[in-house]
Amino acid sequence: MELSINSNQVFVTGYVEGIEDSNSVMNALNSVIKNSKGGVVSLVLEEAFVIPSSLIGLLLEIKENYEHEIEILAKNEKLITLMKRLNLIDVLNIKKI
């Protein structure tokens, strides 16, 4: 997995696997949140077809505890389908790119 940050977007290339990767993504998101003054923070998943439940939980925590909106931009249709089944499309503002 590789991470990059551009303004208010965190780009993830590869697959988010396990707690360590989830923590790396969350550290990147927290950095974006601390350095911005509100607005939308985007997590762009370029290849992932699943994301760990630990990352889902942390994203829900950000949504509840910060003044920022979270959106997930996903390229993989399998991930979109999975998020629909979990009823998370609207909760986490998930969009296909």
Image (spheres, rainbow, N blue to C red):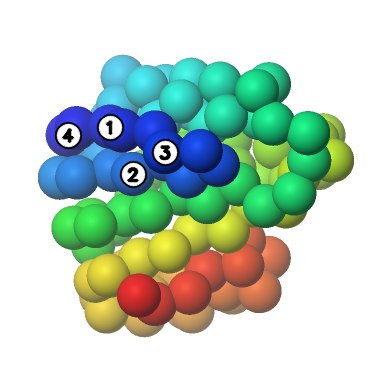
Which quadrant of the view contains residue 36? top right
Residue located beneath label 4 in the image: 1
Label 3 with label 1: CB-CB less than 8 Å: no
Residue nearer the viewer, 41 or 66 = 41
Q: What's under tag 4, amino acid-wise?
A: Met
Residue located beneath label 1 in the image: 3
Neighbour class for label 3 at 10 Å: few (<14), some, many (≥20)? few
Residue 21 in percent (x, y) is at: 30, 27
Where disc 2 sits, the SS reads: strand
Residue located beneath label 2 in the image: 11
Where disc 4 sits, the SS reads: loop
Q: Is residue 79 left or right of residue 92?
A: left
First-in-chain label (2 vs 4): 4
Residue nearer the viewer, 43 or 89 = 43
Q: Is residue 7 left or right of residue 60?
A: left
Neighbour class for label 2 at 10 Å: few (<14), some, many (≥20)? many
Q: CA distance from mark 2 to mark 3?
A: 8 Å
Q: CA distance from mark 4 to mark 3?
A: 17 Å
Q: CA distance from mark 2 to mark 4?
A: 10 Å
Say if residue 61 shows up in the picture: no
Of the 4 image quadrants, the one containing the C terminus is: bottom left
Give me the residue at 46% from left, 25% from top.
28
